[in-house]
Image (cartoon, rainbow, N blue to C red):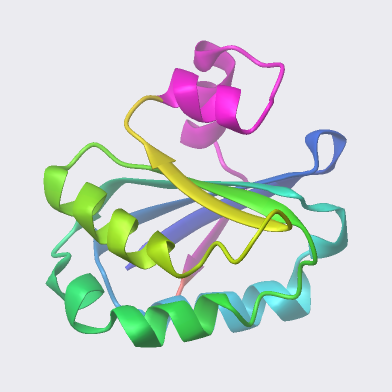
Amino acid sequence: MKIEYQVFEKENLLIHKFYDRWSTREYKDYITFSIKNLNLGVVNKILTDLRELEAIQPLFDEINQIQAISKEIPLDKYINVHLVTDPMLTVASHIYQQTMSPGDKIQYTYCSTLAYSLELLNLNINSQEAEKRINNLEFSFNA
């Protein structure tokens, strides 16, 4: 699995995009790396682009493990929007998020359009600019 990512401090935004076959082990490695190496203290908005993710069966099989890993992220208040276009990824995101949004401090949601994800994140950039950022993320993580 390949993950591209970048923190945009001006918008308090982390964008990460997942590619290829899902791997829970590699996701855990990425989260551990992010906690140690990224300036997450400025982040309160996360755009998780899952449009290029394949082989999602492990998402269903390991949903509890994935949730536990995600809860390790040391942020007090944030919104994480999953950008999904595949029907099975939509279902996986829905199941994942049912227990991940404990209240008003941490919110998970999903949608199928970039424009709506920008609205949910309350970002003042247009879809073209956002897509340009997503397609040119500065860093790549390969476990």
Q: Nearer the viewer, residue 141 or 44?
A: 44
Q: Quadrant of the N terminus?
A: bottom left
**Spot occupied by residue 108 in the image (x, y as percentages of width and height):** 52, 53
Between residues 45 and 39, which one lies in front from this camera angle?
Answer: 45
Q: Is residue 79 visible?
A: yes
Q: Please give left or right for residue 78 compared with residue 68 in the image.
A: right
Quadrant that contains the C terminus: bottom left
Q: Which quarter of the figure has residue 61? A: bottom left
Residue at 76% x, 66% y is 38
Residue at x-position 40% and y-position 79%? 66
Q: Is residue 5 magenta?
A: no
Q: Relative to the observer, which residue lies in front, 54 or 102?
A: 102
Magenta part of the chain: 114-141
Give residue 11's position: percent from left, percent from top: 79, 34
Q: Is residue 109 left or right of residue 56?
A: right
Is residue 119 positioned above or below 138 on the image?
above
Residue 48 appears in the picture as rendered: no
The image shows residue 63, relative to residue 38, as above or below, that is below
- Residue 119 horizontal/vertical position (percent): 58, 22
Residue at screen point 49% across, 85% down: 68
**Which x, y percent locates residue 100?**
50, 67
Please state the total of marks drawn on the protein image: 0
- Residue at image coords 45%, 70%: 99
The residue lying toward the viewer, choosing from 43 and 4, is 43
101 to the left or right of 85: right
Q: Is residue 119 magenta?
A: yes
Q: Is residue 102 left or right of residue 99?
A: right
Residue most toward the front?
103
